[in-house]
Amino acid sequence: MSIISHQKHCQYLRGCALNSQKSLSLLRVMIALSPMSMAAVAVATLPNLNVLQVARGTSDSHHVDSILRCDDNRWMLIRVPLSQNAKDKMARLVKNLRALSKGVRARLPFSIPNVLAYQPVKLSSGMNMTLIMDHPQGYALRDIKPGEGAATSIGCAIAAIHNLPSGLLISAGYTHKTAQDCRYEVIDFVDKANATNMLPGSLKEKWETLVEDEDLWKFQTTVVKKNFSMDSFRFQDNQEGGSSVCAILEWEDASIDDPAYDLHWLNQLSHESAESILKAYEAFSTTTHDRGCLERAKLYAELDIARILIDGVREEKHELIDMAKRLLLELDRTSAQEDTPKQAIHKAEGLLENAQNLSFEQQRLYEIQSDDVNAYSDEETYKSDQVSDSGISENLRNIEEFLGSAKTNTEEENSEAKNE
């Protein structure tokens, strides 16, 4: 059995300590929950399990993961939560994965993790819930090219999720909303943002106009995954020499909700790649055509920025409040120059993405983790989870730099729109 080198493991623990206010307690937990000890838990939990390789997975101050390779060439992930929020999130993940029966999964052109064990286990750090699930193989991509290939496959994959029969999953326990539920939820959120008395007046008026537009909220809710990002996908090579989606991860927020939630993350890609994804999505979707879907996706992207303001006010973090106010002012300025809802998704979510850059310590932690995993397998690409609000507040200087270049970016997008 391979083991992580002592030197790299110590570097990893030091990186964790740098990124947590509770560094000492986290350090002790990480030592107690080493990949070797977690592999021992898996062997004790699952009968006839023979582990050949073990490596640290994605771990932070909320949970610890380890990746196992077994003698039958199966890959598994074992996860231990470190906070109550992480426990609640893991419970939702287990419920949603178990609700996806074999019949439902057969309708999807990709694989989804299966829960192998979910039970309390006595660890050296104390009693805790432990999740063991299979770990779909494939590689991650950061650069999605437009046209046939990965972009088309992503669009088809999202459409396949939205095409699932909602009734089956509601019966299996999925939370569900109607279109009007979604509308009232947005109304409440806009009211909360407005209660801060820090929203630019024109943004407030714009959002209120959108939620009052009854035609915009006439749609059929569908099965949605909700927390999409590029880290949600695993790819494999296809016969045409390109890449196709072979697995989708992170199902803890799946529900019956507005399909627009699964489209507003496309800022992570180029405008051309996002257009290719949307084109494939529209072609393969069997749900009722919803003309307002992109407009709501744009709205959700903008409200994500307002969420930073609300969080800052609630936690009394003045640097977070100041950053959110600058982002909202810039969004207010660029909103007047928007040409299409698709372009607006990039603008609004682009501001948020720049607010969530990794800090130096977090980036270093990711590099150490990648080195550890690559020592055991060239078949997988892992990365650390998204950063917390504290990570956002540490990178205000990145926001200032972005705001300075926003005018140039907006002019380029307007030029592209005129050429279409």
Image (cartoon, grey):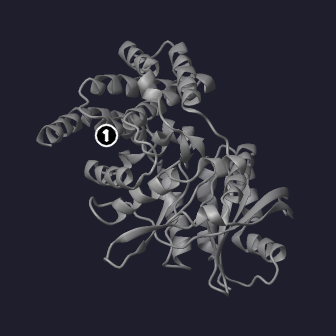
376 in relation to 77, above or below: below
282 in relation to 298, above or below: below
Helix, strand or loop at mark 1: helix
Q: Is residue 254 visible?
A: no
Q: According to the image, label 1 marks what residue?
A: 342
Q: Is residue 350 visible?
A: yes
Quadrant of the rendered structure where residue 222 is?
Answer: top right
The front one of 408 and 103 is 103
Using residue 398 as the reference point, say whether residue 126 is left or right of it.
right
Identity of the residue drawn at 45% across and 53% down: 159
Using residue 218 as the reference point, say whether residue 249 is left or right of it.
right
Identity of the residue drawn at 62% across and 77% down: 5
Q: Position of residue 186 (x, y in %)?
A: 53, 26
Amino acid under disc 1: Lys
164 in relation to 202, above or below: below
Q: Position of residue 187 (x, y in %)?
A: 53, 21
Residue at the extreme left of the image, as rendered:
419
398 in relation to 117, above or below: above
Q: Position of residue 297 (x, y in %)?
A: 42, 37
Identity of the residue drawn at 49% across and 77% down: 379
The front one of 202 and 68 is 202
Quadrant of the rendered structure where residue 417 is?
Answer: top left
Quadrant of the rendered structure where residue 42 is?
Answer: bottom right
Report the label total: 1
The front one of 241 and 19 is 241
The front one of 353 and 361 is 353
State the quadrant of the N terminus: bottom right
State the quadrant of the C terminus: top left
Crowding at dot 1, Cα within 10 Å, few <14 / some 14-19 / many 20+, comes out as many
Identity of the residue drawn at 40% across and 17% down: 209
